[in-house]
Image (spheres, rainbow, N blue to C red):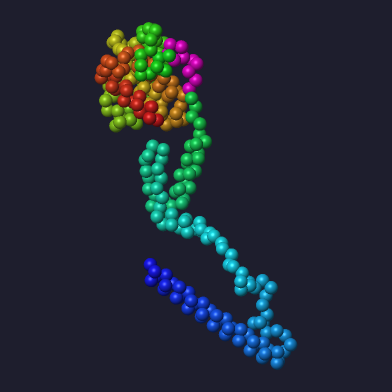
Amino acid sequence: MSLLCSFVLAATEHLRRQTVSLEARMRSLEDALSIVQGSISSETHPLLDYPDNYPDEEEEPQLKPIIEKSTDDTSISESLGSLHIDGKGAARFFGPSGGSESAQGLEANTSTKARQTLLELDDSHFPEDIIICYRSFPFEPSGIVPSNVQSMIEAFLPPIERAVFLCETFMEHLTWMFQIVTRRHILKELIPAVYKRVQVSYGPHDLALMLIVLGIGTLVDLNISPYSLEAQHYYRLSQAALTLQPVLGEQSVVTIKVLNPVILIIEL
């Protein structure tokens, strides 16, 4: 360390002596130029005419920060591409051809989604017992007569033609996801039983399964707006029907079938 300091001090002294020598030589040249110029003209030589704003020798230089150029950052981002991560943690990478333009598009889509406000279903048209049931999901409410509430829920069912259409829409778009819910069970067994076309007994969870299928069928119906109030209507009724029979204590096959799509709706 001491050797390095000695080297730095020696180099500094050498530069100082060299600077003094150059300044003395510069003064000699200026004097010679002034003598020659005075012999031929009364005007000062241009090289000896210092401007008013010429900095003094003792003036310290003004320090300025380095300004980063945004064009460099842009060029780097465009050459490397961009990585977008949505709110659920899913990542999408855009290569060099999808640089800042893709990022701007994602920002525009994000701002557009932020401006959209989803309409919440007004549950005031439901009887109080139905409201109590779906708000207590997945627990069974107290002081409720299941058979009476089930009749109230069935009073809010759509016409059978609409129910068949929504179930067909559900099967068309989501059969690959919900293979445990078959077309035959919904269209040939469940709908006729609920709509009293055949004398077959069914429980509250069977009714909840049909209602959740109607709700998801409404969500994937391309003829209506996304997240429609009709879908929320069927979802609330399905929740209410689920609470009419214990969910956590006495699981059955139909209970598992209805809970699978209900979880999907919750994630949406």
Does residue 162 appear anywhere in the picture? no
Of the 4 image quadrants, the one containing the C terminus is: top left
- Residue 113's place in the image compared with 243, above or below, is below
Q: Residue at x 47, y 78 (%)?
A: 14
Question: Which quadrant would residue 54 be assigned to in this image?
Answer: bottom right
Q: Residue furthest left?
A: 253
Q: Does the magenta portion include 160? A: no
Q: Position of residue 90 (x, y in %)?
A: 37, 40
Q: Nearer the viewer, residue 202 or 83?
A: 83
Of the 4 image quadrants, the one containing the N terminus is: bottom left
Query: How many labels, in total?
Result: 0
Q: Position of residue 52 (x, y in %)?
A: 69, 73
Magenta residues span: 121-131
Question: Which quadrant would residue 148 be assigned to in this image?
Answer: top left
Q: Nearer the viewer, residue 230 or 12?
A: 12
Q: Main secondary structure of the magenta part?
A: helix
Q: Does the magenta portion include 130? A: yes
Q: Residue at x 50, y 39 (%)?
A: 112
Q: Nearer the viewer, residue 5 or 249?
A: 5
Q: Residue at x 27, y 28 (%)?
A: 179
Horizontal arrangement in the rendering, residue 136 relative to residue 183 (left or right): right
Q: Position of residue 177 (x, y in %)?
A: 30, 31
Q: Position of residue 136 (x, y in %)?
A: 40, 17
Does residue 216 appear anywhere in the picture? yes
